Amino acid sequence: MQYPPENVCFDCDSASGLEWHEVSGRGTINGYVVVHDSRLRMWVPQQPYNVAVIHIEEDHTINFFSNLPGTKADQVPVGSKVQVEFVETQSGQKIPEWQIVS
Amino acid sequence: MSPTQNAPASLYRTTEGLGVWEHRGKVAAVGIGHSPTARRWDERVESSIGSWAIIALRNAMEDAGVSPDQVDGLVIVPAATTGDLWAPGNPLPEDFAKTYEPTDNINDGISSMSAEWILKNMPELSNVQFTMHARTCMSDAVVVAAQAVGDGLTKTCLVLKTWNNLSGRYGHDAGSNALDDAPGNSQWTNPWGWGAAAITFAYLFDQYCRKYDKNHDMMAPFVVNEKRNGLLFPEGFWAQHRPEPLTVEDYLAARWIAKPANLFDCDLPIQIAVAYLFTTADRAKDMKQPPAYILNHASDRTKVKSSVQTLDECEQATDSIGRKLYEGAGITASDLSFENMYDGYTLFHQFHIEGLRYAGIERGEALDLYQTDISIEGPNPVSPSGGNAGSGRTRTWMHTDCIQQLQGRAGARQIKKKAEIGVSGGPTTTGGNFTVWSATPD
């Protein structure tokens, strides 16, 4: 597996054999960073904010980012289980986010 | 001459099992040339990276005792910043446009640097027959030049890297960083506020601390030592402009940028040009400075499988670099007198030196080493250059220091133990280029 999606295999640069895989949407919080000084203009008003890294259940080398909505800055429960949900950003993009389930 | 090409993959040593480098001890760096430094470009022609590149190149030739007509090769990194380029449509400062011959690239001499620009504006380099561009930074140019000299593509080669820093906050107003949505590849990072390399390396460090039961405070002796060494580097930005020592208390009290990365874990973007003169070992013997021989070079072309490099991937990549360097140089970790691996976020220096097994450390032990005597006076000098943290963002201090240490002219930074073999390179744990240097060719 590889993520984000690309049109070639990250390992062999070939496009043949690539296909979409459906996954459970479950994962684990592997770690996090608290951003206090972002380069991204649209994120400056949110500072400080969490960016956690989620390992999906099917393959722990595949990771997703999450702001863990509802979790206070620097209060991230590393190791907790999470479930994906798709949310719309302020600019209308739909992205995978993650909610703590245990 | 035909337009300068990027270095082909065949010049890099990227895999294990290649054996001892075929040009081991047959290529050397002799001359060093640094320009002045500045925090940002003031838009005067005299302080453009074009002007400073010419100064650095002339200084390197003078240092080696080589006349311009003896130079037959030029290896340059065209990219001159990881920040902002001169804005399209923004007219060049009038003096700059009057002073220098342009190329097709409006940024040349201001926020990029091609071999063509140098040859147009340094007519004294009349015998250059070989030019090549290296993609990323001086570490890349060093290995390209080493292999090119070894292969006989050039006999006396100038190697150049420039860094520019325009006005404004570095990277804050450029590209997708300034947008309210996330187009292209930024769709995989920006929607969560993952927007700078500092975050990537803060995350890797977070993983490292969890795995090995370490903490950010343990970085303090290393960062303080970096600044101390940097203030002993007369060519460096901090030594020239802001000779302010850093204390453990300063480090621990610094504001967070992306916790666990604080202000002093980040380097300061500056304006500078740095050049070296490379040649064959035979020619080097007759030059003005002693040769710093190259025993091997190796490169990492690690691909990251997902959104961010994992600690496992990082450790596998840096372990492999260590093995490749030692294999090609025909040495072991115990042969290193010192190391100058990259530190352009301080939080990944430990990955590099653990990959080397420097000073006998294993995985998870670098921060323990930092609690011992890692100074230039001690038995295990760590980064005697002071790196980017000690002298500003150039990704070159580590190479300059290796050459100077082995030549015995590192001045106040000269390590107390005998400098026999050193190693330098970077930048990151997701790809880089590395070199083993020696005071002798054997």
Image: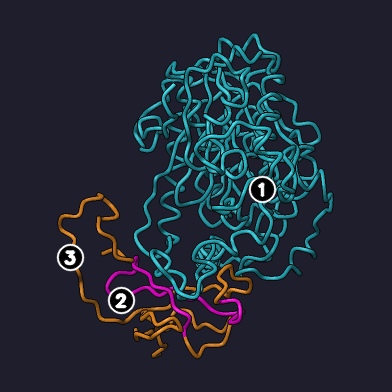
Which chain is cyan in the rendering? B
Q: Residue at x 53, y 60 (%)?
A: B197
Q: Are marks 1 and 2 in contact (CB under 8 Å)?
A: no
What is the distance, in whole Å, between disc 2 and disc 3 at their CAs? 19 Å
Which tint was used for chain A? orange
Observer able to see residue B347: yes
**Drawn side of residue B403 relative to residue B18, left or right:** right
The residue marked by circle 1 belongs to what chain?
B
Q: Amino acid at mark 1?
A: Asn
Per the picture, the main secondary structure of the magenta-coloured stretch is strand
Task: Report the quarter where the N terminus of chain B lies.
Answer: top left
Q: Do the residues at discs 1 and 2 belong to one chain? A: no
Task: Report the residue marked by disc 2.
Answer: A57
- Mark in the foreground, 2 or 3: 3
Q: Which residues are magenta?
A: A43-68
Which residue is painted at 61% across and 81% down in the image? A45
The answer to whether residue A47 is left or right of residue B331 is: right
